[in-house]
Amino acid sequence: MSDKNYKALVVEETDGRYFRSIQSRNIDNLPAGELLVRVAYSSLNYKDALSATGHKGVTKNYPHTPGIDAAGIVEESRSPAFAPGDPVIVTGYDLGMNTAGGFGEYIRVPAAWALKPPDGLSLREAMLFGTAGFTAGISVWKLSEHIRPDDGEVLVSGATGGVGSMSVAILAKLGYRVAALTGKAEEKAFLERLGACRIVSRQQFQEHSGRPLLPVQWAGCIDTVGGAVLENLVKTTAPLGVVTCCGNVASADLALTVYPFILRGVSLVGIDSQNYPMVQRIGLWQKLADAWKPAALDGMYTEKTLDDLDECIDRMLAGKLKGRILVNMQQ
Protein backbone atom coordinates (compact mmCIF):
# COMPACT_ATOMS: atom_id res chain seq x y z
CA MET A 1 0.00 0.00 0.00
CA SER A 2 2.98 2.31 -0.41
CA ASP A 3 1.07 4.36 -2.99
CA LYS A 4 -1.75 5.11 -0.54
CA ASN A 5 -2.32 8.78 0.18
CA TYR A 6 -4.61 10.04 2.91
CA LYS A 7 -5.78 13.30 4.49
CA ALA A 8 -4.46 14.51 7.83
CA LEU A 9 -4.33 17.60 9.98
CA VAL A 10 -0.67 18.59 10.04
CA VAL A 11 0.92 21.06 12.46
CA GLU A 12 4.12 22.68 11.19
CA GLU A 13 6.67 24.88 12.94
CA THR A 14 8.27 27.88 11.23
CA ASP A 15 10.54 30.24 13.20
CA GLY A 16 8.88 29.32 16.49
CA ARG A 17 5.33 29.77 15.13
CA TYR A 18 2.90 26.93 14.52
CA PHE A 19 0.52 26.52 11.60
CA ARG A 20 -2.24 23.95 11.03
CA SER A 21 -3.48 22.72 7.66
CA ILE A 22 -5.16 19.73 6.04
CA GLN A 23 -2.59 17.95 3.87
CA SER A 24 -2.24 14.85 1.74
CA ARG A 25 0.17 12.37 3.33
CA ASN A 26 1.45 8.94 2.33
CA ILE A 27 1.31 5.87 4.53
CA ASP A 28 5.03 5.34 3.92
CA ASN A 29 5.58 8.34 6.19
CA LEU A 30 3.80 6.67 9.11
CA PRO A 31 5.96 5.25 11.92
CA ALA A 32 6.73 1.57 12.36
CA GLY A 33 4.12 -0.64 13.98
CA GLU A 34 2.35 -3.98 13.59
CA LEU A 35 -1.05 -2.49 12.76
CA LEU A 36 -2.14 -0.19 9.95
CA VAL A 37 -5.58 1.16 10.86
CA ARG A 38 -8.00 3.15 8.74
CA VAL A 39 -9.48 5.63 11.22
CA ALA A 40 -13.27 5.91 11.26
CA TYR A 41 -13.63 8.26 14.23
CA SER A 42 -11.44 10.31 16.52
CA SER A 43 -12.18 12.92 19.19
CA LEU A 44 -10.76 16.22 20.37
CA ASN A 45 -9.06 16.36 23.77
CA TYR A 46 -7.26 19.16 25.57
CA LYS A 47 -3.93 17.43 24.99
CA ASP A 48 -4.64 17.51 21.25
CA ALA A 49 -5.22 21.25 21.41
CA LEU A 50 -1.87 21.67 23.18
CA SER A 51 -0.08 19.54 20.59
CA ALA A 52 -1.75 21.52 17.80
CA THR A 53 -0.37 24.79 19.17
CA GLY A 54 3.25 23.74 19.69
CA HIS A 55 3.31 22.63 23.33
CA LYS A 56 6.69 20.88 23.54
CA GLY A 57 5.66 19.13 26.75
CA VAL A 58 3.21 17.14 24.61
CA THR A 59 4.88 16.98 21.19
CA LYS A 60 8.60 17.44 20.76
CA ASN A 61 9.01 17.41 16.98
CA TYR A 62 7.06 18.94 14.10
CA PRO A 63 5.55 18.54 11.53
CA HIS A 64 3.09 16.37 13.41
CA THR A 65 -0.47 15.01 13.26
CA PRO A 66 -2.21 15.18 16.68
CA GLY A 67 -5.07 13.00 17.86
CA ILE A 68 -4.64 10.88 20.99
CA ASP A 69 -7.80 8.89 20.14
CA ALA A 70 -8.63 6.69 17.18
CA ALA A 71 -11.15 3.98 16.39
CA GLY A 72 -11.17 2.18 13.08
CA ILE A 73 -10.59 -0.96 11.06
CA VAL A 74 -7.32 -2.87 10.73
CA GLU A 75 -6.11 -2.90 7.12
CA GLU A 76 -2.75 -4.59 7.66
CA SER A 77 -1.53 -6.65 10.60
CA ARG A 78 1.76 -8.27 11.56
CA SER A 79 0.33 -9.39 14.91
CA PRO A 80 -1.43 -12.71 15.56
CA ALA A 81 -3.81 -10.86 17.89
CA PHE A 82 -5.44 -8.88 15.06
CA ALA A 83 -6.52 -9.57 11.49
CA PRO A 84 -7.47 -7.27 8.62
CA GLY A 85 -11.08 -6.22 9.09
CA ASP A 86 -10.93 -6.21 12.90
CA PRO A 87 -12.38 -3.12 14.60
CA VAL A 88 -9.97 -1.59 17.12
CA ILE A 89 -9.77 1.22 19.67
CA VAL A 90 -6.46 3.01 20.25
CA THR A 91 -6.21 5.63 22.99
CA GLY A 92 -3.30 6.90 25.02
CA TYR A 93 0.26 5.60 24.98
CA ASP A 94 2.19 7.81 22.53
CA LEU A 95 -0.57 8.15 19.92
CA GLY A 96 -0.97 11.77 18.83
CA MET A 97 1.89 12.94 21.04
CA ASN A 98 5.07 11.99 19.18
CA THR A 99 3.43 9.33 17.02
CA ALA A 100 1.17 10.45 14.17
CA GLY A 101 -2.34 10.39 15.61
CA GLY A 102 -6.02 10.04 14.96
CA PHE A 103 -6.44 13.33 13.05
CA GLY A 104 -5.20 11.41 10.02
CA GLU A 105 -7.23 8.92 8.02
CA TYR A 106 -4.59 6.27 8.77
CA ILE A 107 -2.43 5.43 11.78
CA ARG A 108 0.27 2.80 12.24
CA VAL A 109 0.78 1.64 15.82
CA PRO A 110 2.15 -1.20 17.93
CA ALA A 111 -0.39 -3.97 18.45
CA ALA A 112 0.07 -3.55 22.21
CA TRP A 113 -1.70 -0.17 22.01
CA ALA A 114 -4.89 -1.57 20.44
CA LEU A 115 -7.91 -3.42 21.77
CA LYS A 116 -11.06 -4.80 20.21
CA PRO A 117 -14.20 -2.96 21.29
CA PRO A 118 -16.32 -4.93 23.77
CA ASP A 119 -19.79 -6.12 22.83
CA GLY A 120 -22.30 -3.28 22.96
CA LEU A 121 -19.84 -0.54 22.01
CA SER A 122 -19.59 0.75 18.44
CA LEU A 123 -16.52 2.55 17.10
CA ARG A 124 -18.53 5.76 17.11
CA GLU A 125 -19.54 5.31 20.76
CA ALA A 126 -15.94 4.49 21.68
CA MET A 127 -14.90 7.90 20.41
CA LEU A 128 -17.82 9.62 22.13
CA PHE A 129 -15.99 8.45 25.25
CA GLY A 130 -12.43 8.73 23.93
CA THR A 131 -9.60 9.56 26.32
CA ALA A 132 -11.82 12.03 28.17
CA GLY A 133 -14.49 9.40 28.87
CA PHE A 134 -11.87 6.79 29.67
CA THR A 135 -10.21 9.17 32.14
CA ALA A 136 -13.61 9.88 33.69
CA GLY A 137 -14.14 6.13 33.97
CA ILE A 138 -10.87 5.62 35.86
CA SER A 139 -11.78 8.51 38.16
CA VAL A 140 -15.21 7.06 38.91
CA TRP A 141 -13.69 3.62 39.45
CA LYS A 142 -11.18 4.93 41.99
CA LEU A 143 -13.81 6.99 43.79
CA SER A 144 -16.39 4.18 43.85
CA GLU A 145 -13.92 1.82 45.53
CA HIS A 146 -14.38 3.88 48.71
CA ILE A 147 -17.47 6.07 48.31
CA ARG A 148 -20.99 4.61 47.97
CA PRO A 149 -23.94 6.54 46.52
CA ASP A 150 -25.55 6.84 49.96
CA ASP A 151 -22.38 8.31 51.55
CA GLY A 152 -23.26 11.82 50.39
CA GLU A 153 -22.91 14.25 47.55
CA VAL A 154 -20.04 13.95 45.06
CA LEU A 155 -18.70 17.03 43.28
CA VAL A 156 -17.23 17.18 39.78
CA SER A 157 -15.20 20.24 38.76
CA GLY A 158 -14.85 21.47 35.18
CA ALA A 159 -18.20 19.82 34.70
CA THR A 160 -18.94 21.04 31.17
CA GLY A 161 -15.61 19.78 29.80
CA GLY A 162 -14.95 16.37 28.30
CA VAL A 163 -13.76 14.56 31.44
CA GLY A 164 -16.11 16.53 33.69
CA SER A 165 -19.28 15.98 31.69
CA MET A 166 -18.54 12.26 31.33
CA SER A 167 -17.87 12.00 35.07
CA VAL A 168 -21.19 13.66 35.88
CA ALA A 169 -23.07 11.33 33.53
CA ILE A 170 -21.39 8.12 34.70
CA LEU A 171 -21.79 8.96 38.39
CA ALA A 172 -25.46 9.79 37.85
CA LYS A 173 -25.94 6.48 36.01
CA LEU A 174 -24.51 4.70 39.05
CA GLY A 175 -26.90 6.44 41.43
CA TYR A 176 -24.66 9.12 42.96
CA ARG A 177 -25.95 12.57 43.84
CA VAL A 178 -23.74 14.83 41.75
CA ALA A 179 -22.93 18.51 42.22
CA ALA A 180 -21.45 20.08 39.07
CA LEU A 181 -18.85 22.83 39.57
CA THR A 182 -18.66 25.20 36.60
CA GLY A 183 -18.03 28.77 35.59
CA LYS A 184 -20.67 28.49 32.86
CA ALA A 185 -23.97 29.21 34.54
CA GLU A 186 -25.64 29.24 31.13
CA GLU A 187 -25.01 25.48 30.85
CA LYS A 188 -27.22 24.58 33.82
CA ALA A 189 -29.76 22.77 31.63
CA PHE A 190 -27.01 20.76 29.90
CA LEU A 191 -25.56 19.61 33.23
CA GLU A 192 -28.96 18.73 34.62
CA ARG A 193 -29.66 16.58 31.55
CA LEU A 194 -26.48 14.68 32.36
CA GLY A 195 -27.78 14.00 35.85
CA ALA A 196 -26.37 16.79 38.04
CA CYS A 197 -28.57 17.46 41.07
CA ARG A 198 -27.28 20.98 41.53
CA ILE A 199 -24.89 23.49 40.01
CA VAL A 200 -22.07 25.07 42.03
CA SER A 201 -20.40 28.29 40.90
CA ARG A 202 -16.67 28.02 40.26
CA GLN A 203 -16.21 31.46 41.84
CA GLN A 204 -16.78 29.89 45.26
CA PHE A 205 -13.74 27.64 44.85
CA GLN A 206 -11.18 29.43 42.69
CA GLU A 207 -9.55 31.60 45.38
CA HIS A 208 -6.82 30.40 47.74
CA SER A 209 -8.39 30.45 51.20
CA GLY A 210 -5.19 30.29 53.24
CA ARG A 211 -6.92 28.05 55.81
CA PRO A 212 -5.68 24.48 56.27
CA LEU A 213 -9.23 23.06 56.48
CA LEU A 214 -12.69 24.23 55.44
CA PRO A 215 -16.18 23.01 56.46
CA VAL A 216 -17.02 19.59 55.09
CA GLN A 217 -19.28 19.58 52.00
CA TRP A 218 -18.61 16.47 49.88
CA ALA A 219 -18.25 12.73 50.31
CA GLY A 220 -15.84 12.77 47.40
CA CYS A 221 -14.75 14.80 44.37
CA ILE A 222 -13.52 14.36 40.82
CA ASP A 223 -11.32 17.31 39.92
CA THR A 224 -10.35 18.06 36.33
CA VAL A 225 -8.78 21.53 36.64
CA GLY A 226 -6.21 21.61 39.49
CA GLY A 227 -4.94 24.73 41.23
CA ALA A 228 -7.01 26.50 43.88
CA VAL A 229 -10.11 24.52 42.94
CA LEU A 230 -8.42 21.22 43.78
CA GLU A 231 -6.96 22.75 46.94
CA ASN A 232 -10.38 23.81 48.19
CA LEU A 233 -12.04 20.54 47.22
CA VAL A 234 -9.53 18.59 49.29
CA LYS A 235 -10.14 20.93 52.23
CA THR A 236 -13.94 20.48 52.03
CA THR A 237 -14.05 16.69 51.56
CA ALA A 238 -15.51 14.58 54.36
CA PRO A 239 -13.46 12.26 56.58
CA LEU A 240 -12.26 9.18 54.67
CA GLY A 241 -13.40 10.82 51.44
CA VAL A 242 -11.63 10.53 48.10
CA VAL A 243 -10.58 13.25 45.66
CA THR A 244 -9.31 12.26 42.23
CA CYS A 245 -7.09 14.59 40.20
CA CYS A 246 -6.52 14.42 36.44
CA GLY A 247 -5.92 17.96 35.14
CA ASN A 248 -4.00 21.19 35.60
CA VAL A 249 -5.69 23.67 33.26
CA ALA A 250 -6.08 26.11 36.20
CA SER A 251 -2.62 25.50 37.64
CA ALA A 252 -0.11 22.74 38.29
CA ASP A 253 0.62 24.18 41.74
CA LEU A 254 -1.12 22.88 44.85
CA ALA A 255 -0.95 24.83 48.13
CA LEU A 256 -1.98 22.32 50.81
CA THR A 257 -0.97 21.32 54.30
CA VAL A 258 -1.06 17.70 55.48
CA TYR A 259 -4.11 18.38 57.68
CA PRO A 260 -6.84 17.12 55.32
CA PHE A 261 -4.91 13.86 55.09
CA ILE A 262 -3.93 13.30 58.73
CA LEU A 263 -6.95 14.85 60.47
CA ARG A 264 -9.72 13.71 58.09
CA GLY A 265 -8.07 10.81 56.32
CA VAL A 266 -8.85 12.26 52.91
CA SER A 267 -7.21 10.43 49.97
CA LEU A 268 -5.92 12.32 46.93
CA VAL A 269 -5.70 9.95 43.98
CA GLY A 270 -3.87 10.87 40.79
CA ILE A 271 -5.39 9.66 37.51
CA ASP A 272 -3.18 8.78 34.53
CA SER A 273 -5.00 7.26 31.56
CA GLN A 274 -2.13 7.45 29.06
CA ASN A 275 -0.31 4.29 30.15
CA TYR A 276 -3.14 2.55 31.99
CA PRO A 277 -2.39 -1.22 32.02
CA MET A 278 -4.09 -3.16 29.22
CA VAL A 279 -5.80 -5.71 31.48
CA GLN A 280 -7.49 -2.95 33.52
CA ARG A 281 -8.03 -0.96 30.31
CA ILE A 282 -10.08 -3.79 28.77
CA GLY A 283 -12.10 -4.18 31.98
CA LEU A 284 -12.93 -0.49 32.10
CA TRP A 285 -14.00 -0.37 28.45
CA GLN A 286 -16.35 -3.27 29.22
CA LYS A 287 -17.93 -1.22 31.99
CA LEU A 288 -18.29 1.79 29.70
CA ALA A 289 -19.92 -0.41 27.06
CA ASP A 290 -22.52 -1.74 29.47
CA ALA A 291 -23.40 -0.79 33.06
CA TRP A 292 -21.58 2.55 32.99
CA LYS A 293 -22.78 3.77 29.59
CA PRO A 294 -24.66 7.06 30.26
CA ALA A 295 -28.24 7.25 29.08
CA ALA A 296 -27.44 10.78 27.88
CA LEU A 297 -24.43 9.71 25.76
CA ASP A 298 -26.01 10.79 22.48
CA GLY A 299 -26.67 14.26 23.86
CA MET A 300 -23.13 14.86 25.07
CA TYR A 301 -21.27 15.54 21.85
CA THR A 302 -20.98 17.67 18.74
CA GLU A 303 -19.95 15.89 15.55
CA LYS A 304 -17.31 17.54 13.40
CA THR A 305 -15.14 16.70 10.41
CA LEU A 306 -11.40 17.02 9.90
CA ASP A 307 -11.98 20.36 8.17
CA ASP A 308 -13.75 21.72 11.27
CA LEU A 309 -10.94 20.96 13.71
CA ASP A 310 -8.96 24.18 13.33
CA GLU A 311 -11.77 26.29 14.79
CA CYS A 312 -12.61 23.67 17.44
CA ILE A 313 -9.03 23.68 18.72
CA ASP A 314 -9.11 27.45 19.22
CA ARG A 315 -12.49 27.25 20.95
CA MET A 316 -11.28 24.49 23.27
CA LEU A 317 -8.25 26.50 24.36
CA ALA A 318 -10.53 29.49 24.98
CA GLY A 319 -12.80 27.36 27.20
CA LYS A 320 -15.78 27.78 24.86
CA LEU A 321 -16.65 24.13 24.21
CA LYS A 322 -18.87 21.79 26.20
CA GLY A 323 -19.14 18.04 26.26
CA ARG A 324 -17.30 16.00 23.65
CA ILE A 325 -16.18 16.72 20.10
CA LEU A 326 -16.55 13.63 17.90
CA VAL A 327 -14.42 13.76 14.74
CA ASN A 328 -15.95 11.80 11.86
CA MET A 329 -12.96 10.82 9.73
CA GLN A 330 -15.16 9.21 7.07
CA GLN A 331 -16.50 12.54 5.75
Image (spheres, rainbow, N blue to C red):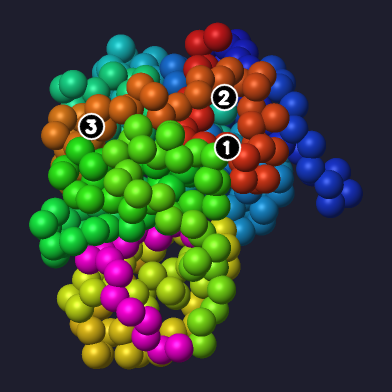
N-term mark: 1 or 3: 3
Residue 221 painted magenta:
yes
| Residue for point 74% across, 32% down | 20
Which of 12 and 308 lies nearest the eye of the viewer?
Answer: 308
Q: Is residue 149 above or below residue 214?
A: above
In the rendered image, which quarter is residue 131 located in?
top left
Which of 322 and 48 lies nearest the eye of the viewer?
Answer: 322
Q: x%, y% of residue 162?
A: 45, 41
Question: Is disc 2 placed on a helix, strand or loop?
Answer: loop
| Residue for point 62% across, 13% down | 5
In three-dimensional space, the C-alpha distance between marks 1 and 3, rounded to whole angstroms, equals 22 Å
Q: Is residue 265 above or below residue 230?
A: below
Residue 48 painted magenta:
no
Question: Is disc 3 placed on a helix, strand or loop?
Answer: loop
Provide the residue span drawn in magenta. 211-225
Q: x%, y% of residue 313?
A: 65, 36
Q: Is residue 129 above or below residue 136?
A: above
Q: Main secondary structure of the magenta part?
A: loop
Q: Label 3, on which residue? A: 293
| Residue for point 23% across, 84% down | 264
Q: Amino acid at mark 2?
A: Gly
Q: Label 2, on which residue? A: 104
* 243 lies left or right of 163: left
Q: Label 1, on which residue? A: 321
In the rendered image, which quarter is residue 77 located in?
top left
